[in-house]
Amino acid sequence: MKTQTMAHLLVPPMTANAMAHLLPLSSPLSITLCFFAWLQAFLVVHGNTNNITNPSSLTPINRDLYHSSGDLMEEIKALVFRHPDELTLDTIKSRNKGYSAEIAIVTYCRRRQETDDQPKLRILLSFGQHGRELITSELALRILSILSKEQFLPNLDPASLDSTLDKLLIKVVPMENLNGRRLVEAGDLCERRNGRGVDPNRNWSVDWGKKEKDYDPYEENPGTAPFSEPETQIMRKVSMSFDPHIWINIHSGMEALFMPYDHKNTTPDGVSSHQMKSLLEELNQLHFQKRCMVGSGGGSVGYLAHGTATDFMFDIVKVPMAFTFEIYGDGAASSRDCFKMFNPTELGTFNRVLNEWSAAFFTIFKLGPEQLGENYSKSSVPTLLDKWVSIDEYLEGYLVERSSRYGKKMEVLELGMQEIRTYFRLFLLSSVLLMFMFCSRISKSKCARPIVSAIAI
């Protein structure tokens, strides 16, 4: 969720006036100082000081509740190490114009070592897409701990849980925007963008780059082009290759259960739209006493968002159920007090958020197969014709350089991406040329054939 922020640079009026008296009236510096003094006096007189916040009044990160990004990832690595039969960890890296990023992805599959021909419902969960939303990555850790049975949900039968998890293949991205998270930890508590100032949730291709009247470049910079950022490049590759049945993008800033679309004030047509809405309403009833907002992001949140991940997942990847969840928000917090606005600051609320939302996710794990019916038995590898994507998107979805949890790099194919594209295009070009030459030769042969009279001379 976005928020409006503004930086103000004000000089104390007494100091500014005193300095101005020491300078000639015609001096540019004197004029500038007088202007700042007048501006602050105007704001004070009119009581418009809402956007001026004393830094000492801003809520800092509660280190007793929240892991640092490094510590959280170390906890997850240790969790994977303790449960190798169910969890695997891959790290995918990408680089663009001197800026690099990496994303860790945890895959859960119960009894993955055993041969199992049963089709799996594939679920892709992304947390921490915006750096300032620390609570979302804490929820990722909690869900992984429950999946590996190091933590437990109350009133959940273990046998029933095992039966549910046998049907699932789950990929969890605990911290999509690691570079942005590090900026927040360094003190920029309102930072939602990646390490070079681009919003990862405005850098996707569906309706990319459109700017509404309330567009805020600090909050919503979409980048120079769709998928210009390594983070979105990685997530596109993962989504194209994994082909999930359920996608959930987890954020904070309010309490909401959103379905497509974000870029327009409407929901999709058809059966999938009914299935999504039905599931969200049941979640809202079971876990949140109907206090969550439910509907399309564009129609519910109060602004349209263009180039978002969820719209891409639904429209391009054709994910049957694509959601955006907003798991917490302090509406009473100042728009400058970002840590408090987006994250619980005391233990009771912190635990309540994690308990309620982790329970909601396990309800999704149970109800998802029931809602989709037989639709989730589709092939685990989509074809190019099924998805109608470009050859570039298709190749980038499958040819991904990965680093396993043992640090050994693997290539899906030995040939590089650029070489494969080049060879494919040369093949297409040569095919067209050969076809043209063949047709031209046939045409010339017909024209050059001698005409023989049927009448004997």
Image: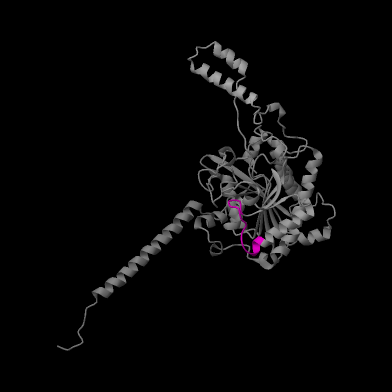
**x, y percent for residue 329:** 72, 42
Check the image and name the residue furthest to the left: 457
Residue 176 magenta-drawn? Answer: no
User: Residue 170 lies in what quarter of the image?
Assistant: bottom right
Residue 270 magenta-drawn? Answer: yes
**x, y percent for residue 273:** 65, 60
Visible in this render: residue 102?
yes
Q: Give the camera-side residue of 225 and 288.
A: 288
Check the image and name the residue furthest to the bottom: 456
**x, y percent for residue 274:** 67, 62
User: In which quadrant of the rendered image does the C terminus lie?
Assistant: bottom left
By secondary structure, the bulk of the magenta-drawn segment is best described as loop
Q: Give the camera-side residue of 381 and 288.
A: 288
> What is the image's colouring?
one colour
Above/below status of 230 relative to 368: above
- Judge left or right: residue 447 versus residue 269: left
- Judge left or right: residue 56 versus residue 435: right
Check the image and name the residue furthest to the top: 22
In the rendered picture of this protein, how many numbered marks are placed on residues?
0
Above/below status of 216 relative to 441: above
Q: Which residue range is magenta in the image?
A: 261-273
User: In which quadrant of the rendered image does the N terminus lie?
Assistant: top right
Q: Residue at x 63, y 62 (%)?
A: 380
Visible in this render: residue 77?
no
**x, y percent for residue 278:** 71, 60
Q: Residue at x 45, y 57 (%)?
A: 423
Q: Give the camera-side residue of 299 and 429.
A: 299
Q: Residue at x 56, y 45 (%)?
A: 230
Check the image and name the residue furthest to the front: 46
